[in-house]
Image (tube, helix red, strand yellow):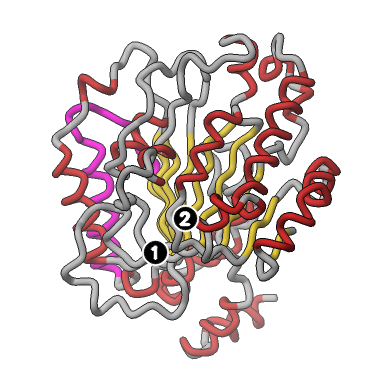
Amino acid sequence: MAAQVAQAAQFPPALLSKVFGFLDTQAPSLTRLQHQPVLDLTDSPTVNLKSISAVSLRWRQNVLQLLFKHIRVLLKWDGDFWWTLKVEAMLKFARRSGIAPTVRSLTIVFNSLDEERHFSKEKPPPGKIDQLWKSVFDIISPRRLTVVAPPEILSYMTSCSLSTPVLAHYHIPHQILSLALAPPTDLTRMSEAKPSLLSIRPWSSLLLNEGSFIRAYSICGYPYIGTSPPSILTDLVGGSRKTNQFILPSSIQDFSYVAIFPFSFHFGNLRNLPPHLRRLFVKLIPSGDMLADPWQTAQANVLDLVQERNSCYEQLLSFVSKPEEAKLHRHLKMIECGDGDVEPAWGAEMARHHGAIANINSHIIIR
């Protein structure tokens, strides 16, 4: 064994890089973006690259770019904006170590807000977060950026308005926003881009995961439409058709909406999606056994959950089966439901709308 280790220590850097490359894996968060938002989104059961980096300084230098190809920054919100110092420290490390050009994804995770802390009283000036994003993208150019945060913080990080200040009814601790670039993307022309997160890069896809609405069925009562859920969706897609100005950038062609049994009146905001979208993906039922959790379901009636989900399916297909809706979404090429493989109700709704869709939008793919 000692002889083998001695031989490996003499491998040239190019050969070591080739060997270490076989141990590289995709970012663990990619497989969890459609699950219930959690703080350990980026945790990986595989630590091969970390173990290699601990063998010797030479091996660490060789594996460093692979090790930090996907970066996570875990933050705790504070009204004095001290958490930005941790972001700045990450950027200094990226520049000093030489990994900046090879960073492929950045995930920023915020812990939950303290119950006694009122976000609205601690919200820093809006221009400060725009400057932070500019600092980030001046140094690294990740092809995917993901923010996991309480709804209040997510609205601030994206410069979007939150639909409601009443949060207790819904018990949604975290939501996810994930933006990605389509390869290849020329970033040399982005020097004049606005500094806000949504416009600082020509993002091609956006995923919004609003978490579980199940607790609201019990606490708010059902049907409950008195208060909208804590969400940036309305502001993101444009809550009114009185103007043609959408916050969602025109570069985004792929929009994914994930929520667990959302109320249909809220899901209906998707009809305001701008007409330039080519693909719409939705997922409305949990991936695991959340319905078996008594804390989640509490006094919720499962039939109410099913009724709201089916209403959401019907609204989704009306985008392309009703002439007035189809005209607004004329560039839409694909509607995909992530529940299709396990939920027969989606198949039933597709069958019911098949004739109308074929007459109006024969070119669209629905699955």
Q: Is residue 280 visible?
A: yes
The residue shown at (43%, 68%) is 181
Q: Is residue 38 visible?
A: no
| Residue under label 2 | 206
Residue 58, picture quadrant: bottom left
Vertical comparison of 77 with 91: above or below: above
Amino acid on which the number 1 mark rests in the picture: Trp
Q: Which residues are magenta?
A: 74-97
Amino acid on which the number 2 mark rests in the picture: Leu
The residue shown at (60%, 30%) is 264
Foreground of the two, 54 or 166:
166
User: Is 339 a magenta residue?
Assistant: no
User: With 111 as the anchor, is 190 left or right in this view?
Assistant: left
| Residue under label 1 | 203
Vertical comparison of 305 with 246: above or below: above
User: Is 83 a magenta residue?
Assistant: yes
- Quadrant in which the N terminus appears: bottom right
Residue 80 image position (x, y, % from top left): 17, 29
User: With 348 as the anchor, is 267 left or right in this view?
Assistant: left
Residue 140, picture quadrant: bottom left
Vertical comparison of 235 with 143: above or below: above
User: With 136 as the anchor, is 206 left or right in this view?
Assistant: right
Q: Secondary structure at mark 2?
A: strand
The residue shown at (35%, 58%) is 249
Residue 320 image position (x, y, % from top left): 63, 55
Residue 234 image position (x, y, % from top left): 41, 37
Q: Secondary structure at mark 1?
A: loop
The residue shown at (58%, 70%) is 24
- How far apart, in angstroms, are the residues tagged by discs 1 and 2? 7 Å
